[in-house]
Amino acid sequence: MKALQYRTIGAPPEVVTVPDPEPGPGQVLLKVTAAGVCHSDIAVMGWPAEGFPYELPLTLGHEGVGTVAALGAGVTGLSEGDAVAVYGPWGCGTCAKCAEGKENYCLRAGELGIHPPGLGRPGSMAEYLLVDDPRHLVPLDGLDPVAAVPLTDAGLTPYHAIKRSLPKLVPGSTAVVIGTGGLGHVAIQLLRALTSARVVALDVTEDKLRLAREVGAHETVLSDAKAADAVRELTGGLGAEAVFDFVGVAPTVKTAGAVAAVEGDVTLVGIGGGSIPVGFGLLPFEVSVNAPYWGSRSELIEVLNLARSGAVSVHTETYSLDDAPLAYERLHEGKVNGRAVILPHG
């Protein structure tokens, strides 16, 4: 089968031919219908050789949907041809966090060498994907694969981040979204669907801000050195009750801290390496700073239900598997408006 692999440190990914996988006991083989392209992959491919955490070559793709192609021995509850989404942050399935459905916070994944598809084990940017356990599959129930696949990360991750702050996003409150790309433009929709907050979106280009307005942002601000002052002015000097940074580089993280209100939440979702100094007098009183990771399986089900209701949708552009390197190139250059999706079977 064809697969998109990261094969050499510092080199672009390549489309190669690899052996077809076969499901062992308890495993499920999917025929991949769609795979999502994510900035996290670019971050992974930007890591230096020293301390690189994964074995190469690595088949990319941690967002995946497909149809069941074959079942390993002992698998029940699924049939060949079932359309499913892949829950990506795999865990051990038995620790306290996994028992809560929070495999994204599995307490033993590192110890046991468990990795998500595309982030340590073969991912979804291939014609077929081997899934370790049927519990990591969620029925699509009529959702279009292209529309659904980004929801497994670009929908699930902001949903998980926003849920924590829902008690603060009451009528009259403000939520700030920094970075309105793949995850951020979904976050805006989630905030509009789940809260009464005024949503202020920040990004570096007018094209990105245009998308933010199209999906529901009440206000848009260019993300530059003057952004924090602009947000403070919009909020009468009080700041925002919740700030979600989907970029995570030093300048955006600085802005996030600068626009938070007293008792506000600052949530750093982007993995750009930025950090916020926390201490008395460094932030408004009782500001909470957190860095969440992905989301739970039950939250993925909730996100897919929101999509079925029409409350959230993802702007997508599609590519063949052969053109997947181009999709990453365009994403790196900031030319993807929304989310790029790879169609391994055309």
Image: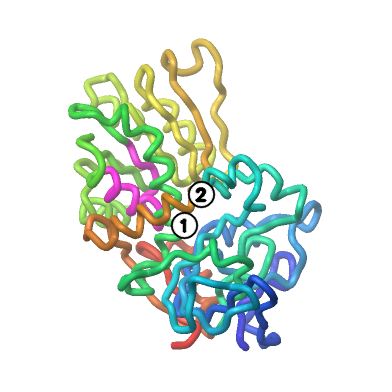
- Position of residue 195 measured from the top left corner of the image (x, y, whole percent): 24, 38
- Position of residue 336 measured from the top left corner of the image (x, y, whole percent): 40, 66
**C-alpha distance separating marks 2 and 1:** 7 Å
Circle 1 Cα neighbour tier, 10 Å, few/some/many (<14 / 14–19 / ≥20): many
Disc sitting over residue 82 in the figure: none
Residue at horizontal 35%, vertical 52%?
302
Q: Is residue 58 left or right of residue 262?
A: right
**For this rendering, which residue is in front, 281 or 62?**
62
Can the viewer see residue 241? Answer: yes
Q: Which residues are magenta?
A: 176-191
Is the C-beta separation of discs 2 and 1 under 8 Å? yes
**For this rendering, which residue is in front, 254 or 54?**
54
The quarter holding residue 126 reads bottom right
* Lower position in the chain sequence, tag 2 or tag 1: 1
Circle 2 Cα neighbour tier, 10 Å, few/some/many (<14 / 14–19 / ≥20): many
Residue 182 is inside the magenta segment: yes
Which residue in the rendered view is the most extreme toward the top?
Answer: 280
Position above or below: 210 against 139: above
User: Which residue, given by chain and number where applicable, does mark 1 sit on?
Assistant: 153
Residue 40 is inside the magenta segment: no
Residue at horizontal 19%, vertical 27%?
172
User: Which residue, given by chain and number where applicable, does mark 2 sit on?
Assistant: 294
